[in-house]
Image: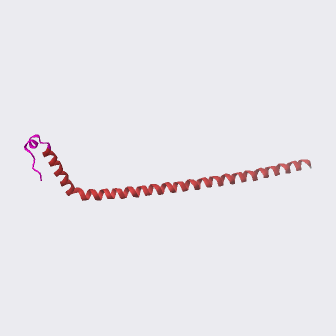
Amino acid sequence: MTATSLDALRTGAPTRKIADEKMEQVRELLLGEDLRRTDERLLALETHLQNLQTDVYHRLDAMQARLDALSAEVAGNQRAAFDELSKGIADLGQRVKNLSRI
């Protein structure tokens, strides 16, 4: 330990500095290990949260791709159904014309 000069004692600043350092040492002794464990746990939780977030984003992208594919398939099926329907209506129209000629 270093001795404090008389002038330093009169101003009170170094005493405060020493007291702050000692309080910091006491805090470290009392809470240091718990704070380090808490920091480690928080870091692990943050990492896990980031992994979950990345997983959710990938799943959402896959779902969007699947929805796009299904939408395209439905649109194709609708076009095919409308084409079939229009052919049926054209055939029916032709039959009506043929019946009216008879």
Residue 80: image location, x then y, percent: 72, 53
Of 82 and 50, nearer the camera is 50
The answer to if 53 sits in the magenta stretch is no
To which quarter of the image does residue 10 belong? Answer: top left
Q: Residue furthest top?
A: 11
Is 12 on the left-hand or right-hand side of 84? left
Is 46 on the left-hand or right-hand side of 16? right
7, above or below 34, in the image:
above
Residue 4: image location, x then y, percent: 10, 47
Residue at the (51%, 57%) spot, across then down:
59
Q: Residue furthest right?
A: 102
Residue at the (77%, 50%) spot, across then down:
86
* Labels in figure, total: 0
Residue at the (62%, 52%) spot, across then down:
71
Of 4 and 28, nearer the camera is 4
Of 52 and 82, nearer the camera is 52
Residue 18: image location, x then y, percent: 15, 48
The answer to if 8 sits in the magenta stretch is yes
Residue at the (60%, 53%) spot, across then down:
68
Is 37 on the left-hand or right-hand side of 97? left
Q: Residue furthest left?
A: 6
Span highlighted in magenta in the image: 1-13
